[in-house]
Image (tube, rainbow, N blue to C red):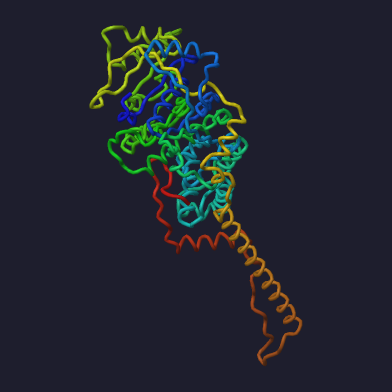
Amino acid sequence: MLLKYGNRHGLIAGATGTGKTVTLQVLAEGFSAAGVPVFLSDVKGDLAGLCAAGSATHKLHEGFAKRAATIGLDLQYRAFPVLFWDLFGQKGHPIRATVAEMGPLLLSRLLELSEPQEGVLNVAFRLSDEEELPLLDLKDLQALLTFVAENAEAMSARYGLVSKESVGAIQRRLLVLENQGGADLFGEPALELSDLMLTDASGAGRISILAADRLMNSPRLYATFLLWLLSELFETLPEVGDPDKPKLVFFFDEAHLLFRDAPKALVSKVEQVARLIRSKGVGVYFITQNPADVPEDILGQLGNRVQHALRAFTAKDQKDLRLAAETYRPNPRFQIEEAIRDVGTGEAVTSFLEAKGIPGIAERTLVRPPSSQLGPVDEAVRAQLIAASPLKGKYDITVDRDSAYERLRAKAEKAAREAADLQAEEARKVEVDREFERARRYDGKGYESPKKQSSRSDSIGTAFAKSFARQLGTKSGQAIIRGVLGSIFGKR
């Protein structure tokens, strides 16, 4: 692959057990050695071996040496600079985003909301923006939704119909997400994208590895998080045109999870991001079993392709195999369809962009052996690297600053105090009136009667709602700009 076309995106496809993970590892090594930072997800735990050098005592060393001799490679084992990340903070640095940064579109996708429920969630985000109620973690969003439900009438008058039933459905989905560990994703300190684009002292690009073995138990959370990260890169990074090498390469493993059951509007936005993020210097590589897992409009953006073997056991498999072969530039020396079916483990049909970005002719290719360790590393080695990381301590402690939950609670407490004061004042007036009744005075024209007073004061909820309605009528709101996928610019 020509390094200057590394940001033209790519695809690694093939059936289970055909060598996709090793291909990903080899590509990550190549980018890192060229000074390009890499982000990838470790679904099976195998890619952690990038942090350790391969060994002549490994059971596959003899096969590696034979392959290296066949292709004329001087195989030198070496380790690569690695940063470990984990949404749950167990196998790497915690990695978080705020609810505001995630945005209503991606959050609706994560919670599997219906269209009316998504509309209510958009109302909540709009209220957060206008009333300066920062949404940082799940308790902020839960508190705001409770406030929306209690003031549904005032909300409906300003934003359109807001039903308590829809709010309740969103709250139940948030509870499911929380039970699945999704609460660990939201909070502060939020990830700084610059920490994914580091190099070591020798100039090698650091490889950020997201531990995804546990995360894969919640596949929608996995897909939504990676999509959010991609959108943040798209919205944040400046235009760089056509650099000599990418600024970052992003590997999206199990890519079919991104597009499975995704609404057309979301797929369209992902296509837009994939098409335009190239000019930000970011290359995106999708890893999946079948090229058909990726929508055609996005597949057309993937210039660098590594196609491992596809099995054709059914009529659908045969059709997918034929369609995959048709996307390659023909090679007169062999039939591409037959090659895709017949290549063995560690072999692939490849096509990389050539001069002026022209797709290269398909070739049957032997994949080089990795220089780093093939397979997982001991937890002790992982722990040592985390302890020696340049980011040690930066994300370890959760920060819970003043946000929507605290501000709404303060408003509720203030409303409760005001209601209590009103009740006390009412009780005092009733006592005065009672004393006046007992000792009415004659003014020469008749007995003076006390003025009628309200028999009860507003409830806490009513007082809060009236106060909120007054705010809606007087507050101009805060202008918030959101990007293609609904993520917010900057931190909240």
Residue depicted at 23% across the width and 27% down the height:
356
Q: Residue furthest left?
A: 356
Residue 203 % position (x, y): 40, 36
Hey, which quadrant is residue 445 in on the image?
bottom right
Residue depicted at 31% across the width and 7% down the height:
335
* Front residue of 170 and 38: 38
Residue 191 % position (x, y): 49, 43
Compared across the picture, whether 439 is left or right of 47 comes to right
* Front residue of 429 and 187: 187
Q: Residue furthest right?
A: 438
Indicate whether 362 appears above or below 250: above
Indicate whether 252 appears above or below 342: below
* Front residue of 388 and 461: 388
Q: Residue furthest bottom?
A: 444
Number of numbered discs visible in the structure rendering = 0
Residue 354 % position (x, y): 26, 23
Quadrant into which the N terminus falls: top left
Compared across the picture, whether 175 is left or right of 18 comes to right
Residue depicted at 50% across the width and 11% down the height:
62
Compared across the picture, whether 130 is left or right of 271 comes to right
* Front residue of 428 and 338: 338
Residue 262 % position (x, y): 44, 30
